[in-house]
Image (cartoon, rainbow, N blue to C red):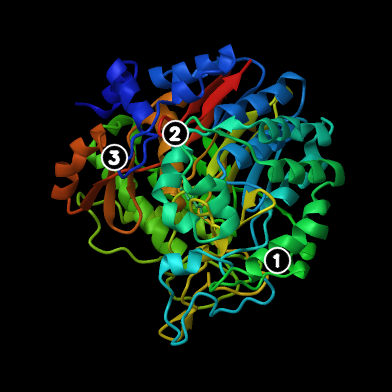
Amino acid sequence: MRLFALMLLAASPAFAQQATDAVAPERGLKAVPETAVFGGLPKAARAALGAKADGTPVRAQDWMIAVANPLAAEAGAKVLRAGGSAADAMIAAQAVLGLVEPQSSGLGGGAFLVWYDAASGGLTTLDGRETAPLDATPRLFQDEAGEPLAFFDAVVGGRSVGTPGTPALMQAAHDRWGKADWAGLFDPAIRLATDGFKVSPRLAALVADDSARLQRFDDTAAYFHPGGVPLAAGDTLANAAYARTLRTIAQGGAQAFYTGDIAADIVATVRGAGDAPGVLSQADLALYKVIERPAVCAPYRAHEVCGMGPPSSGALSVGQILGMLDSYDLAALGPDSPEAWRLIGDASRLAFADRGRYMADSDFVPMPTEGLVAPDYLAARAELLAGDDALPEVAPGDPAWDHAQLWADDDSIEFPSTSHISIVDAAGNALSMTTTIENGFGSRLMTHGFLLNNELTDFSFRSHADGVPIANRVEPGKRPRSSMAPTIVMRDGAPVMVVGSPGGSRIIGYVAQAVIAHLDWGMDAQQAVAMPHLVNRFGTFDLEQDTQAVALDGALRKMGFQTSVRALNSGLHAIVLGEGLLGGADPRREGIALGD
Ligand code: DON
């Protein structure tokens, strides 16, 4: 059966059921249907859940928000309805996400934001990435023999906690683009935290799945396993400590997070984390800065695909993949063609080879940022795709740069959580923000009602390979390389698509695929986020289980690819701008698009 045909099948009850069940955990735990938990929602939100289940986009004229939880969408929509800006709506939605989706993002984490400014026609980005503590050394994730720690030994506890960036990013966005009163933006989250909200199926399933690690630290255990019993879907959960924290930030600004009691308790929690203490200090918190950086854009077809440059590898890698594919007619090949996926898969492998070699925090290591997306460089890399079979070997290229350093390939590991917010406001501003505490439930440390990130495990655990330094090694004050790819696609100076996803380093493939699905294959916002995933980073082609992606298995193997059929938990949220606004929410997550 054709892949595109599968998208049309989304309207059938069978596919709707599959979409709802996709929020069930990977390991077979039983989930309560979304509709049972989100049943008390206003009419528009219920309609939006229905549209997602039917595989149709949500339509609006003036404004739209697409985000991973209906309560967060409601909070943002309320702000937009009242004339607030996209930045205001993001703050309201993020405050709710930190409560209802605590495993994915929150005050203890970091985020990247891409902003299109309707008044000036300009694009810019805010880097709210966590930083490594000033006391961190390149051996942070190595044992006494200099060997890398096992992944979860590094994640759980204080060692992995970087200085959070999300509160400062919320403040920086409001300082630049806010219209609404800062304090009022926290009201919906404070109310939900005080009165309680219903635990969603996804949260309950993830709590059950992570039960042992969530019980390592008392405050975390008490919240997620009250009375020793894991939270269940439909339970009413209040978080008085989080409400107090939000009130403090509402009254004192983000500054109140980075100094005073909250900062002192973050440091005490990190440094007192049992047998896995970290080295974060109050100086790290007091010194934290959001950095405004130019957007990184790459041409594709008649468009510019723009996003977050270093320390994220997102925009560069998505831009490289699309740049290499620009000379191939994917529209003619179509989404059912193994040849289209050969091209996409091998372009992605080539991009990942460059990512592993060259990409890191460019404030700390020299990076060929422009060379990596230069048209002549990508044209030369694209020639490697001219054959009929999978590339037998893939190596980093030799992009132009003005000051050189020999790097070894990295070996960092990334695992699931994270959330993406797409917003267009009534003034025409567009916001694309990917927000995370890294692993599901981050470091598993909790204070003042929020979880602390484990973002530092996005660094390479090894600092050198065969004596050659690795660009993404740990250094004090440095930001770990990310794959987050909040994206705004531009045409003739105006935004046409706002999109992004969670998914660790698979984010790059999910976002590139959604852009191709819309621009080359004519899919609308909902089809583009729902279509089955095929992702290739390092050689193995991941094919999304229980979807028509599996139908391509034989043909891809014949071309020489190794394949792996598996769950591919993206969380794409997209808004397509044209005649009006079309919103899409990933059926693999609990979110919706809301607009008017
Ligand atoms: O910054 C990054 O690339 C990762 N920390 C994001 C983690 C993530 O997306 C997990 N997703 N499912």
Nearer the N terminus, badge 3 or badge 1?
1
Q: What residue sits right under mark 2 in the picture?
A: 201
Q: How many numbered marks, from 0 up? A: 3
201 to 53, vertically: above or below: below
Which residue is at a point 44% across and 64% down the rendered structure image? 152
Q: Amino acid at mark 2?
A: Pro
User: In the rendered view, does 212 fall on the left or right side of 315?
Assistant: left
Disc 2 and disc 1: Cα gap in Å?
32 Å
Q: Are marks 3 and 1 in contact (CB under 8 Å)?
A: no
Alpha-carbon span between mark 3 and mark 1: 50 Å
Q: Judge left or right: residue 300 versus residue 346.
A: right
Relative vertical location of residue 182 with respect to residue 388 in this rendering, above or below: above
* Residue type, mark 1 in image: Val
- Image point 60% across, 71% down: which residue? 366
Q: Pointer 2: residues within 10 angstroms few (<14), some, or many (20+)?
A: many
- Which numbered dot is residue 267? 1
Of residues 62 and 393, the one nearer the viewer is 62
Secondary element at image label 2: helix
Determine whether, in the image, residue 541 is placed left or right of residue 221: left
Whether ligand 1 has any atom under 8 Å from the Cβ at mark 1 is answered as no
Marks 2 and 1 in Cβ contact (< 8 Å): no
Residue type at mark 3 is Ala
How far apart are the alpha carbons under marks 3 and 2?
A: 36 Å
The image's mark for residue 340 is 3
Q: Specify whether residue 384 is in view.
A: yes
